Amino acid sequence: MSKKLKIAIVSINQPSLNSACKLVRYLEDYEVDVYGKKDLKHNLETLKLYNKLDDILSPAWKAYDAIICILAMGAVARKIAPFLEDKATDPAVIVINLALDKIVPLLSGHLGGANELSDIIVSRIDGCINFISTATDQTNTLAFEMFAKKNHLKIKNLKKLALISNTLLNKKNVEVQTYQNIFDTIPNKNNIIRVDKCTSELCVNINPFKSEHLSFEPKLFFGIGCNRDTSYEEINEAVLIFLQKHNLDFEQIENIASFEAKADEVGLLEFAKKYNFDIKFFNEEEINTLQGDFSPSSAKKFFGLKGVAEPSAILVSKYKELIIKKEVYNTKVTIAGAV
């Protein structure tokens, strides 16, 4: 897993605390707290004591990324039931037996990371078996939420995921409205059809624009060109108008870019600093060797370039796909968008 997870290991008696002490050794690269009853023996530097499970589960639900329980699965199911909220926000809940040789990702297998963490534990404990119950994993079917998680795509309309997943499990087609460069990164495209526009409810939207369908939004990358001495205020206003026109949010912007001749533009640098963008500047060779059908640009006359906004947007972007051609604001600022 990419980040250092906060993990709670919950024991209930001396045998499960003994197992917890052993399990900690396999999770040394994580931030781990072990919970147990008082007056029990252990070799841990610290043990978080509790009297009743009900007392710790409520705060643990919000405080930890994953909760590993070394107790009966039925008891775990009953105890966590009052805290279940949403698959997008519930922590991973895992149950493992005393012998540490059988593990069950019980809750939040995909988005919460229970399946992934269980796989990691299995890889570290000889003979440990992972019992994953999610159907997409068992049938090697594309799980869109895992694709989104791995590619840092924002998920919208998550309640429609079950219909999409069940359709794929039933070997029926699902449309995906997206760009070719993004589509090419999707693994296991069985029963996946790329479309330019959704034609049914069995459709997934993978682009930054608002949709009523199950959506996974990639980050935006803007290429920005400007006249000499264009102010921060003028650039900021142009970007806000651009976003409003295309029904996009400022938070969707990951980064911005421009031509290297603009690297000393005070207004552009102030804009980047204001919003904490790690602005990138590309040179003539990088821009002119880029293949693409770009809009006519005055940069050809002044700099011998194919363009500034469109090529810069593509070069700084993740998927190298131009999705909004350049637009000019107040004859001073040009903006283009890519993913």
Image (spheres, helix red, strand yellow):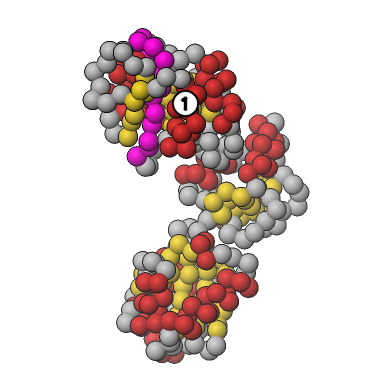
Element carrying mark 1: helix
In the depicted view, which residue is nearer to us: 111 or 207?
111
Horizontal and vertical percent for residue 85? 59, 36
Q: Magenta includes 233?
A: no
Q: Quadrant of residue 271?
A: bottom left
Q: Characterize the local packing of mark 1: few (<14), some (14-19) or many (20 or more) Cα atoms within 10 angstroms.
A: few
Q: Is residue 248 visible?
A: yes
- Magenta-colored span: 4-16
Q: Magenta includes 10?
A: yes
Kindly identify the residue that appears in the image at 39 percent across and 82 percent down.
267
Q: Is residue 290 visible?
A: no
Horizontal and vertical percent for residue 172? 71, 36
Q: Amino acid at mark 1?
A: Asp
Horizontal and vertical percent for residue 261? 34, 82
Kindly identify the residue that appears in the image at 56 percent across and 31 percent down.
83
Horizontal and vertical percent for residue 300? 45, 85
Q: Which residue is mark 1?
A: 55
- The answer to whether residue 19 is above or below residue 8 is above
